[in-house]
Amino acid sequence: MPTYFISDLHLSEDRPDIIRAFLDFMQQQASQADALYILGDLFEFWIGDDDKTRVAKQVEQAIKTLTDAGVACYFIHGNRDFMIGKAYAKRCGMQLLEEEELVELYGKKVLILHGDTLCTDDVGYQEYRAVTQKRWLRKLFLLLPLFIRQRIANKIRSKSKQANTSKSLGIMDVNQQAVEQRFAEYPIDYMIHGHTHRPKIHTLKQAQDQIKYRVVLGDWYQQMSVLKIEPSGLSLSANDQFEKLELAQ
């Protein structure tokens, strides 16, 4: 039974095609898995577990059906849905993980994360992230009426889109030093993350010619990217393109 990884679906009412693709994936592929890991930005935005939109309910039902069938589901917050809380996770039957989590998959040690913490060249975003990580601010935000939270979220999304249009692709990609720091800090065989929307299996050569790998998940705007991991190795799909990596046991 394989293990699946997805991220950056950005589900919203505006893209019913992506919602349908996600529901199909849950029924046809995830249901046949050992586990499903969602590495952030499952939703385009999230303003609180009390915001029970139709999309949130559809996703909740799909994940609950999966977990009730015995397939474990794990979630790491992204930069769009960092407000998903324990209440929604409990309704889904999924487990919330830390922003950087060490897991063992088929005998390999793996670091999983959303990926935005690796984009250290984007100073403006990192400053914004530092503010949103403040627990007191999150609690204050959740005390606001739902319609006000909605307005704030819309303004933040609008400003984010405007800011990104003036940033170079290099600034919004991961910083190589930040990547190497994670490999030095953790005793891992490879790393998996999303966020940058640039699906690829990167090869890194470490000390003593050790080969390590960084697997980047793609988004679901057009790519419908899925990572499938089995004992023999892994395969990354995006836009009907496939990358495979065999891992020595």
Image (tube, rainbow, N blue to C red):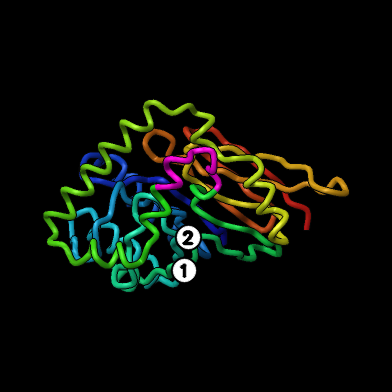
Write the start and end of the magenta stretch as one range.
118-127
Which is more toward the observer, 127 or 148?
127
Q: Amino acid at mark 1?
A: Ala
Residue under the image location 29 percent in, 72 percent down: 87
Q: Is residue 246 visible?
A: yes
- Quadrant in which residue 14 is drawn: top left
Farthest right residue? 208
Q: Amino acid at mark 2?
A: Leu
Q: Label 2: which residue?
A: 36
Magenta-highlighted stretch: main secondary structure? helix
Closer to the camera, 61 or 10?
A: 10
Q: Is residue 77 magenta?
A: no
Q: Position of residue 166 (x, y in %)?
A: 39, 26
- Which quadrant, please, contains the C terminus? bottom right
Whichever of labels 2 and 1 marks the residue nearer the N terminus, that label is 2
Look at the numbered discs 2 and 1 and tell me whether their residues touch, using CB distance below 8 Å: yes
Q: Which residue is mark 1?
A: 72
Image coordinates for residue 127, horizontal then vertical, percent: 43, 47
